[in-house]
Amino acid sequence: MSSFEVRGGKQLKGEIVPQGAKNEALQILSAVLLTAEPVTIANIPDILDVNLLIELLDEIGVKISRSNRHTCTFQADQIDADYLASDEFRKKGGRLRGSVMLAGPMLARFGKAYIPKPGGDKIGRRRLDTHIIGFEKLGARFEYDELHSCFKLSSPRLRGAYMLLDEPSVTGTANIIMAAVLAEGITTIYNAACEPYVQQLCQMLNRMGARIRGIGSNLLTIEGVSKLGGTTHRMLPDMIEIGSFIGLAAMTQSEITIKNAGVEHLGVIPEKFQQLGIQFQIKGDDIYIPSQDVYEIQTFMDGGILTIYDHPWPGFTPDLLSIVLVVATQARGSVLIHQKMFESRLFFTDKLIDMGAQIILCDPHRATVIGLGRKQNLRGITMTSPDIRAGQALLIAALSAEGKSIIQNIEQIDRGYQYIDERLRSLGADIKRVVS
Ligand SMILES: CC(=O)N[C@H]1[C@@H](OP(=O)(O)OP(=O)(O)OC[C@H]2O[C@@H](n3ccc(=O)[nH]c3=O)[C@H](O)[C@@H]2O)O[C@H](CO)[C@@H](O)[C@@H]1O
Ligand SMILES: C=C(OP(=O)(O)O)C(=O)O
């Protein structure tokens, strides 16, 4: 298990370019299975989860030519659909959440699919009901193989249907869309997730010949077609990385410019950091964050304590709440962080408390942060990264803290943040990767 050794308390300075979006990449890469023609994808993040999905595509038989670390052409013209029933797929696919999205395209094109117990962050219950019920509505049969903890799906021909999702699951919506584009007739998905990731997927599918309407809304209408063709696609900048860098700049009193941030796709993310009192300027498509000694958390209009909570898009993404929480520890003022979707994502606050932060963990979903307002620094400690975003939040805490911190289990951070140590060093951070 590798670790980061961080000597904190240094101001950082410079420019940073966000990577391509991890959660978009997992959808887009799955979609290459929908056509036998070449699909070229640019701005692919070079991170563990994405590389693992590319490996899986390779093992399913997709031809992959990589012109550089971030651009690949995929051609799914000779697929081994039975690979998904193998132990190897179950083992590898079970290491990342994104592998569930191979099911929609496989079902649509080859009439069968297998979903192993998915991996990804252990941040609470993460059920797959929305995916499975959606496939069933399209006419697929499913059985659960208890021995291998695996869903088996089959359907000789999918047929369009109306469905009202029980929740706007992000990967669930993507999976159903990918199945419906090749189904016979019209599919209507109400209460669909509408994250930029899903919008990007729909736009790419339409360029491949799909007929999807309502993109960006929670009501999608998909007219099935018999075949899709090749295309090119470029991934958006990763909005979770962008939020993480805004938080990093504020916590470490650093002057940082986030280049090419895809500002029009960030939804309420910039406003949430502004509510913490962080100042920044949008310059073209860049975000300039000046060095700030103090930032003061706003109150609600009636003077009440601010609450920041997650909500399906266009609400605030749950993936940035850990970052918001850590940034609040050095703000002036108080905030209630309410993580509604996941029940195990706030437990990392005990590490921040050990570092000297003032936090009351009210219950698994809510934490009150009483900002230190820089009256005292956090102290460096040894800690373990429990999940991808808490790991990044702890890294930000360590970079702002006095003394040395060791962050263990950094594979969690590497799942989603590309060359993060190298990129932070180029901003002046004192961070070392210790491989063991
Ligand atoms: C690979 C990928 O893209 N992962 C993202 C995706 O995961 P994923 O697609 O797995 O997450 P889902 O959208 O299915 O739901 C996440 C959790 O929130 C709950 N839920 C969801 C919607 C809702 O209205 N109410 C509710 O409580 C679900 O029951 C589930 O426990 O979306 C999550 C929610 O944005 C993000 O944290 C993950 O980073
Ligand atoms: C929870 C996340 O990822 P995954 O769904 O892949 O576990 C995340 O990206 O914050």
Image (cartoon, helix red, strand yellow):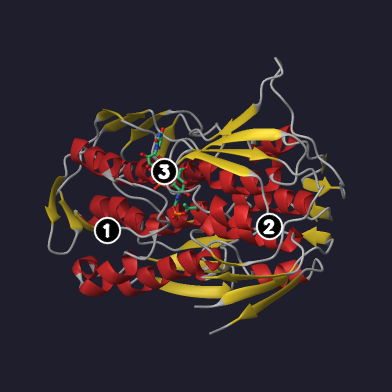
Height in image: 326 above or below 405? above
Mark 3 to mark 1: distance in Å? 19 Å
Kind of residue at badge 3: Glu
Is the CB of mark 3 within 8 Å of ligand 1?
A: no
Residue pictured at 57% horizontal, 63% vertical = 45
Mark 2 to mark 3: distance in Å? 22 Å
Q: Which residue position holds label 1?
A: 117
Identify which residue, 40 or 165, lies in the foreground: 165
Height in image: 88 above or below 176? below
Residue pictured at 84% horizontal, 55% vertical = 254
Task: Residue 107: give x, y in percent of width and height.
Answer: 24, 52
Kind of residue at badge 1: Lys
Q: Which residue position holds label 2?
A: 397
Question: In this rendering, which labeled residue sits more in front, label 3 or label 1?
Answer: 3
Specify the quarter for ligand 1.
Answer: top left
Q: Relative to residue 65, is residue 156 drawn left or right?
A: left
Residue 109 in view, yes or no: yes
- Pick whichever of labels 3 and 1 is earlier in the sequence: 1
Mark 1 to mark 2: distance in Å? 33 Å
Q: Which mark is residue 343?
A: 3
> Element at badge 2?
helix
> Element at badge 1?
loop
Kind of residue at badge 2: Ala
On the image, which quarter does residue 212 sit in?
A: top left
Is the CB of mark 2 within 8 Å of ligand 2?
A: no
Identify which residue, 137 or 40, lies in the foreground: 137
Tell me whether the residue at label 1 lies in contact with that at label 2, contact meaning CB atoms closer than 8 angstroms.
Answer: no
- Pick whichever of labels 1 and 2 is earlier in the sequence: 1
Tell me whether the residue at label 3 lies in contact with that at label 1, contact meaning CB atoms closer than 8 angstroms.
Answer: no
